[in-house]
Image (spheres, rainbow, N blue to C red):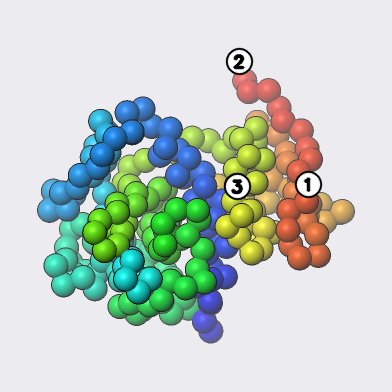
Amino acid sequence: MTVPLRKALDDFALLAVEGQDTLANQPGIDGPWEVDLEAGWLRIGQVTFEVALIGSSSSRDNSWMWGWCNRAFGPQHPAVAPILVGRETARRVGVVEFALETFSLNGLSDYGMHPGSGVAFMAARLSGLTAIYCGPYDGGVAYFGIRGLELPPPDPVAFPRLAGMAGAFSEDHRQTIGQYGRMRGLNPTVPPEGGITLNYPGGSRLTCSFDGWNRLTRITGNVSAPPQ
């Protein structure tokens, strides 16, 4: 059985918005970037992160190439090895692009970033990483997975904003929100009236309603006050 990459990317749209929002809010993150993949670090502005090389996109033909297929690195390179977990997971569930050296990015969601960002984030998240960095260069964009960046606890107050942003990058909002709830430990359930209910630690509950095309139409529920 194969899973279309375009469909699989819907799983990660909300996770990507949350992860990139977390990265963007790191103090000192504004400024130019530089990377040393032999040492495994990326500096953005005043902040240095450990990183893994995911791959790159070409502005010439809008194609993708995995880092493990880049002759300058290869699968055993320390900068590439952390992403192999995601590669094997995607291959196992039948996403064939993870078994190709290169492929076209036409028609694939970029989550509002650069061409290839959706592919890069999916690979990063399947490898246990929470955010990516897109490094433009002459001829394309290099993609790095940020290592060691922890997400804040899921926030029911922030959820409507994040879900609204993610909706622009997903063809199936029901799938996107359900997968987000599962991966963030929110025990998604289906209430009698349908939809998806996210159950937050501390008692907050949000119920998402959808139309016949699985588009998000409404978010209702209760938000409990955080403990003092």
Q: In front: mark 1 or mark 3?
A: 3
Q: Secondary structure at mark 2?
A: loop
**C-alpha span from label 1 to label 3:** 14 Å
- Whether residue 155 is visible, yes or no, is yes
| Mark nearer the viewer, 2 or 3 | 3
Q: Residue furthest right?
A: 193
**Hey, which quadrant is residue 158 in on the image?**
top right
Percent x, y for residue 213? 76, 65
Instruction: Give the residue type that dot 3 points to.
Output: Met
Residue 218 circle label: 1
Name, please, the residue furthest toward the top.
228
Above or below: residue 91 compared with residue 15: below
Quadrant for the C terminus, please.
Answer: top right
> Mark 1 near mark 2, Cβ–Cβ under 8 Å?
no
Residue type at mark 1 is Arg
Query: What residue would you read off at disc 2?
Result: 228
Q: Name which residue type carries label 2.
A: Gln
Q: In the rendered image, which residue does mark 3 sit on?
A: 165
In front of the other: 106 or 210: 106
Q: Are marks 1 and 3 in contact (CB under 8 Å)?
A: no
Q: Residue at x 40, y 48 (%)?
A: 131
Q: Indicate left or right for 28 with 69 as reference.
A: right
- Residue 190 showing in the rendered view: no
Describe the element under mark 3 as helix, strand or loop.
Answer: helix
Q: Residues within 10 Å of mark 3 (few under 14, many from 20)?
A: some
Residue placed most toward the observer, 141 or 41 = 141
Count residues near mark 2 (Cα–Cα under 10 Å), then give few for <14, some for 14-19, many for 20+: few
